[in-house]
Image (spheres, rainbow, N blue to C red):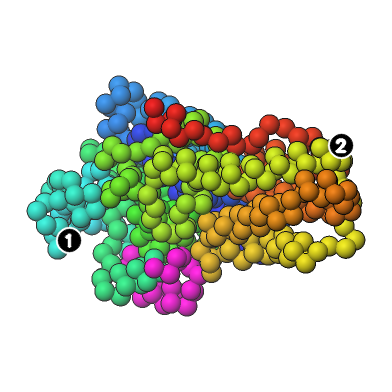
Amino acid sequence: MSKDKFYITTPLYYVNSSPHIGHSYTNIAADCLARYMRLNLGKENVRFLTGTDEHGQKIQKAADASGLSAQDFTDKIVVQFKELWSGLNVTYDDFIRTTEKRHVDFVQRSIQILFDKGDIAEGKYEGWYCTPCETFWLDAQVSDKACPDCKRALERISETNYFFKLSKYQEWLVKYIESEKDFIRPVSRYNEVLSFLKNNRLADLCISRPKQRLNWGIELPFSKDHVIYVWFDALLNYISAVGQFDERGKYTSKWWPASLHLMAKDILRQHAVYWPIMLKALDIQMPKTVFAHGWWMMGESKMSKSLGNVISPVEMAGKYGIDTFRYFLLRDMPFGLDGTFSEEALVKRFNSDLANDLGNLVYRTLTMAEKYFDSVVPAVSEKPKAREIQIREKLDGLPEVISLELCPETNYNFSACLERIWELIAMANKYVEEVKPWSLAKENKAEELKGFIRLLVDVIRGVALSLRPFMPQTAESILEQAGTDKINKGKPLFPRIDTKSADK
């Protein structure tokens, strides 16, 4: 893929239950980057893929418990995900489901290519299996018959399956990661994966499940008695959505390789070990960057469905507004690290950053333009003061600052971008207090007042343009009020929340 195209993906979300904040964090981050790239490259040169992972044992169990067929159950849950993305203003270009024919056919073709190459072979498996994680474990990896990941009880199984030869490509993967420093981000995850590969011998990956144990999956093209392991199936979505194999088995796509794969850190190994080896075996180019962000915590615990401590993104967005929710998630945690979610922290951000800073600047600026110049934006001052020049330099430099922060080398630092924007907002608010425009009006200093108001209007316009990827509704509202030479002041953007009343 050329540099003038941008293809970004999220993981496929597992549909065994409703979505939560962890899902929304990944997709809001992806949406922010996609929006930013559309502004720079044009809508036709950006592709944002998300979707749902719908096969596997957990899905079958959840469907059985709900009294629905697996397909009916997934159809029902998928609607919740699509409604969530719409409700959070997430503008994906494609939504792929692993039960779609385009994906099923592609997966079977991929598996057949690997089988014909000799990279998949039949074998006997005897050992430990975790149903919730749908993962096999070696005896050496297990203690107390508990899953090393989720700590739940394992079962002992023995069965004939098909195995993908991961071990064959381990040395190649180590060399590739060492040569491509941006392949895994942030650096802590890069080091984690490299250390794992250098200190452990990869076992070949069991990529099938016997139908007698599980029949909810894509059938192996060369064995009617097996379905494909859900992880092997799901990882292929990134290429099944944007390309196809020709008659010779060569993959072609306008969009591949992907610019960025986003996911949470708990599924990094699948994306940084299994996935690149699958691509190498299929003779397909690697994605540019695999990025694993941190977790949202509740106190000391990871937010997760299994722990029952999840927060509903629908509830938070409905209570405080879509853009407030987006702002909090992107601002409060440097991308790549863990963060702690609390409603109290969200309200604090709302009152300080959104109500006191941004909302106050916009409303007071438009009120002054309305009061002093009949809502007509004055011309640019011919003799700007030193402080005005300083503020304009900050304003003019914002696009470059945001560009530098939204790249692999700086870990797509949404928080830093918003911090830079808020520095400009703070400078402008402070300038109002320094200049005291009401005094200029009283002293009939018309030219100074014109330059002052014009500077503030330009600042809020620049802030709005910078906020378009992060807070699209807010940006649109500001530009509707101040985007032309005739001011059209509306209501305050973020009326302050009375925390005492809220507590009661």
**Residue under numbered circle 2:** 374
Region of the chain picked out in magenta, as a range: 166-188
- Farthest residue in the front direction? 443
Instruction: Please report whichever mark, 1 or 2, sits nearer to the chain's N-terminal start.
Output: 1
How crowded is the residue under tag 1: few (<14 C-alpha within 10 Å), some, or many (20+)?
few
Question: Tag 1: residue type?
Answer: Gln
- At a point 26% along the width and 70% down the height, the residue shown is 201
- At a point 60% along the width and 37% down the height, the residue shown is 494
- Farthest residue in the left direction? 144
Q: Secondary structure at mark 1?
A: helix
- At a point 74% along the width and 64% down the height, the residue shown is 387
Question: Visible in this render: residue 344?
Answer: yes
Side (left or right) of 482 relative to 190: right
Q: Is 243 in the magenta?
A: no
- Farthest residue in the top direction? 67
Q: CA distance from mark 1 to mark 2?
A: 74 Å
- At a point 80% along the width and 53% down the height, the residue shown is 452
Q: Is 175 in the magenta?
A: yes
